[in-house]
Image (spheres, rainbow, N blue to C red):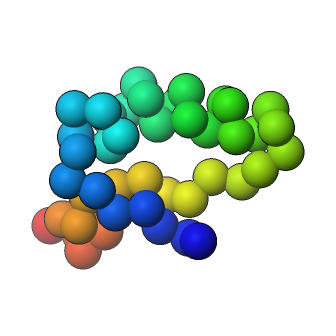
Amino acid sequence: MDYLLTWNCKHIANAEIRNVVAAVAYNHGYGVPVICTPEELMGE
């Protein structure tokens, strides 16, 4: 999966949480999809 779209800006799409998710995934050998809101994906 390339993108994970969410409206949950308090938890999942939060900039601090994105970094934690990326660190955990990379430490376990996984890539991380781009976590963003639909507006961010569309460039709005």
- Residue 30, horizontal then vertical, whole percent: 77, 50
Q: Residue at x 43, y 62 (%)?
A: 4
Q: Residue at x 31, y 68 (%)?
A: 41
- Circle count: 0
- Tell me which corner region of the image, top left, top right, bottom left or bottom right, holds residue 24: top right
Image-based side of 5 in relation to 32, left or right: left
| Relative to 24, residue 39 above or below | below
Image-based side of 8 in relation to 19, left or right: left
In the rendered image, the quadrant that contains the C terminus is: bottom left
Image-based side of 24 in relation to 30, left or right: left
| Relative to 13, residue 39 above or below | below
Q: Residue at x 34, y 55 (%)?
A: 36
In the rendered image, the quadrant that contains the N terminus is: bottom right
- Pick the front one: 44 or 33: 33
- Residue 27, horizontal then vertical, whole percent: 80, 32
Residue that protrudes farthest toward the right in the picture: 29
- Tell me which corner region of the image, top left, top right, bottom left or bottom right, holds residue 20: top right
Q: Residue at x 70, y 40 (%)?
A: 25
- Residue 42, horizontal then vertical, whole percent: 24, 74
| Relative to 17, residue 26 above or below | below
